[in-house]
Amino acid sequence: MPNSKPTIHDFRAMKAQNKNIVMVTAYDYPAAKAVAAAGVDIILVGDSLGMAVLGYDSTIPVTMDDMIHHAKATRRGAPNSFIVTDLPFLSYQVSVAQALRNAARLVQEGWCDAVKLEGGRNIADQVHAIVEAGIPVMGHIGLQPQSVNQLGGYKVQGRTYEDARSIIEEAKILEQAGCFALVVECVNADVADIIATQLTIPVIGIGAGKDCDGQVLVLHDLLGMHDGRLPKFVKTYGNVLDEMVQGVSAYAAEVRATTFPAAEHTYSISVDVRDRLRKEFQPDGHH
Ligand SMILES: Nc1nc(=O)c2c([nH]1)NC[C@@H]1CN(c3ccc(C(=O)N[C@@H](CCC(=O)O)C(=O)O)cc3)CN21
Ligand SMILES: CC(C)C(=O)C(=O)O
Ligand SMILES: [Mg+2]
């Protein structure tokens, strides 16, 4: 069934069969079409859109309305894909009721299949309530970008024995709370390996080494569609920004040289009509 949408059970089966899960972000219609055509397993409408396409310097300003706007466009491009959408900063931390309402908005208005929340024991009640309401939840531990100001920067997490233990414990709490999968971001590969081995749900890594049950990257990072400096965990598989600059530069040069548009880009009228118009409106003509 190539065109049928996978379910959370398929992802658990992939882990059991040692098949790596491929997840990538998309924020709009053309990107969703491209990543669906490439055959990825999960599309993430990440709050990283705030940085990758809205120009903010963190994910903190991203709102529920931003997420729904991009989730809807992404769904239109990938009608048969499993789409996970991030709950943005402060859309779930306030209370269980707030988390439930906003998760439901992403599913009802944004047409996504599951939601993702950053956090561990602090949001276990929210995770449990959302799952109980029938909405699949993906967890997200290790580096939690929505807490960048508390962390003091985007830094590798779990470097001490105590911190690593705490992350492993949080992974177990999230599995217990009902998550169907877990993102582990920016932790040492051995720590991520332990988490993946300890859990029965799939662990999807970003900057967490090769022994996770799957990997996720931001589309704009892996395609070279960004300026600034990239995290160490990104591998670049394309140079789309360079291609965009080259293409627009070539267009600008041809417009200035009047070589664009050429005959094949223009519309015709009959010679008859043309000649009548020319005669009537010739610059030195009579009035
Ligand atoms: N375009 C994009 N890609 C991402 O992966 C991403 C976002 N945006 N926005 C939200 C968060 C922010 N992320 C980041 C951002 C920077 C680093 C980073 O520079 N990390 C340091 C670690 C330094 C250390 O502690 O040793 C690095 O050098 O990789 C990591 C994750 C991941 N997410
Ligand atoms: C980096 C991934 C895991 C994410 O949360 C995002 O794109 O927002
Ligand atoms: Mg995110």
Image (cartoon, helix red, strand yellow):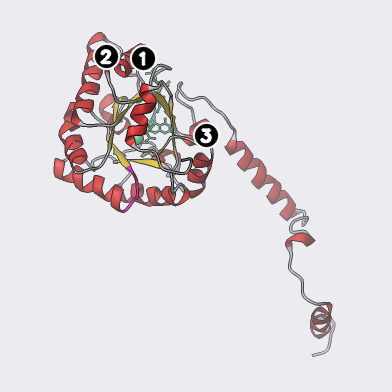
Q: Looking at the image, can residue 205 be seen?
A: no
At horizontal 18% and vertical 27% (from top left) the residue drawn is 121
Mark sitting earlier along the chain (2/3): 2
- Tag 3 secondary structure: loop
Mark 3 and mark 1: Cα distance apart in space:
26 Å
Mark sitting earlier along the chain (3/1): 1
Is residue 242 within the magenta segment? no
The tag on residue 69 is: none
Q: For residue 6, which quarter of the picture? A: top left
Amino acid beneath label 1: Asn
Main secondary structure along the magenta-highlighted residues: loop
Q: Residue furthest top?
A: 161
- Specify start and end residues of the magenta stretch as a single range: 109-113
Q: Would you place residue 66 above or below residue 142 in this image?
A: below
Percent x, y for residue 78? Answer: 46, 46
Residue marked by disc 3? 227
Tags 1 and 2 touching, CB below 8 Å: yes
At horizontal 25% and vertical 19% (from top left) the residue drawn is 167
Q: For residue 165, which quarter of the picture? A: top left
Q: Assign the C terminus to one quadrant of the image.
A: bottom right
Mark 1 and mark 2: Cα distance apart in space:
9 Å
Q: For residue 42, which quarter of the picture? A: top left
Percent x, y for residue 253? Answer: 72, 49
Tags 2 and 3 touching, CB below 8 Å: no
Percent x, y for residue 114? Answer: 31, 41
Residue marked by disc 2? 164
Q: Would you place residue 232 above or below residue 276 in this image?
A: above
Q: Is residue 91 left or right of residue 84?
A: left
Residue marked by disc 1? 188
Q: Nearer the viewer, mark 3 or mark 1?
A: 1
Mark 2 and mark 3: Cα distance apart in space:
32 Å
Q: Is residue 18 left or right of residue 241?
A: left
